[in-house]
Image: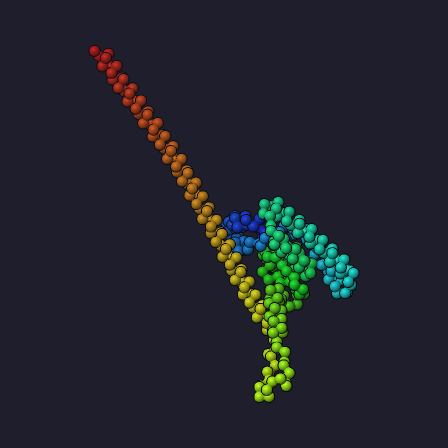
Amino acid sequence: MEFADVARELLLVAPADFVRERTARQRAVRGNDRALATRIGGLRKPAPAAWVVDLLAHEGALDEAVALGPTIRQAQADADPDAIRQLRRQRSAVVAALAETGADRAADAGHPVTPAVLEQVRATIEAAMADPHAGAAVRSGLLVRPLENAGFDAVDLDGALADPDAVPEAWSGTGAEPVPIASARSARSARKPSRASRPAKPPTESKPKSEPQPGPEPRVDPAAERRAARKAESLARTESRDADAALDAAETDLERVEDHRADLERQLADATAEVERATRTRDDAEAASDRARELLRAAQRHRRDVGH
C-alpha cells in the first residue's frame, strides 16, 4: 500500500482519535514495511479545518467549487463586472453550502467544529477556487492545514499536504516560489508605517540658514522586506512543525505507556484470579484432609469397639 493511500484514510479519522489510529496502523505494517511504518509515524495530525476539508474531498463534494474557479478567473481577466458579480454570488452560495455540509459531517463523526474552524474551511475553499494548484491540493484528501488566499497569484502550499509528491499538479506550473500569505501581510504592514511616518519637508524660509536641511529618507526596499518576512515566516513554520511533531511524539509515548499499563493491569487481574483459585484449591484440600482424618479416627474407634 502506498503512503498516500494510508494517509488519506488516517486523515479522515476524527482528530481526537487520530494518534491512536495512526499508532495502530504503524504497528500493523511495521513487520512487512518498516519504511512505510516510519512515514506513517511521522504523519502530522490535521488541523480541524483541514480535517473537515478532507472529509468533503473524500465525498467529491469540492469538485463543483474547484471547477468554478477558472470561470471566475476568466471573468476577472475579461473585466466583465456583471459576470464577476454573478459569479461571486454563486461562489458565496457554493462556499456556504460546503461549509454547512462540512459542519454536518464533523458533527456526525462526533467532533463538532467551532465557528472559527468553519471560517477557515470557507477560506480554504475560496483559496482552492482562486488558485488551480490550491484546488488540486484540497481535492487530494491529503490536506493537513487550512489555506488562505490574500489576492496573490499563488496560494502558499508549503507544509499543507501530507504527501506533496502524490499531488504533482498542486505544484507544477507555478513558475516561482509561492509568496507566503503571512509574509506578504508583514511586508505590506511594514511599508505602510514608513510612508505614513515620513515627515513633510518644512518650508525653507522657516528654518535658520545655519540649520542643516534633512536629507532624503532611506528608500524602503520592498523586496528585501519580503525576503526578511519570508525568512521569518519559514522559521516560524519550521518551529510550528517541530512543535507539532513533538506533541505527536508525546501523545504516542503516552498511548504506549497507557497500553503498557493496561497490559500490567490485565496481568495483575490474571494473577489475582490465579491466587484466588489456588486459595480455593488449598481450602478444598484442607477440608478433604480434615474429613479423611475424621473418617480415620472413626474407623479406629470402631475397630477398638469390635475388639472388645
Residue at 63% x, 60% y is 148
Left or right? Give the position of 172 relative to 301.
right
Left or right? Give the position of 106 relative to 278.
right
Q: Residue furthest left?
A: 308
Left or right? Give the position of 43 relative to 175.
left
Residue at 61% x, 81% y is 216
Residue 87 image-quadrant placement: bottom right
Left or right? Give the position of 59 relative to 296.
right
Viewer-closest of 298 and 182: 182
Residue 240 at x, y percent in the picture: 53, 60
> Can residue 138 be seen in the rendering of this structure?
no
Residue 134 at x, y percent in the picture: 65, 59
Residue at 66% x, 59% y is 127
Viewer-closest of 112 and 67: 112
Residue at 77% x, 65% y is 79
Residue 124 at x, y percent in the picture: 64, 57
Q: Residue furthest front?
A: 206
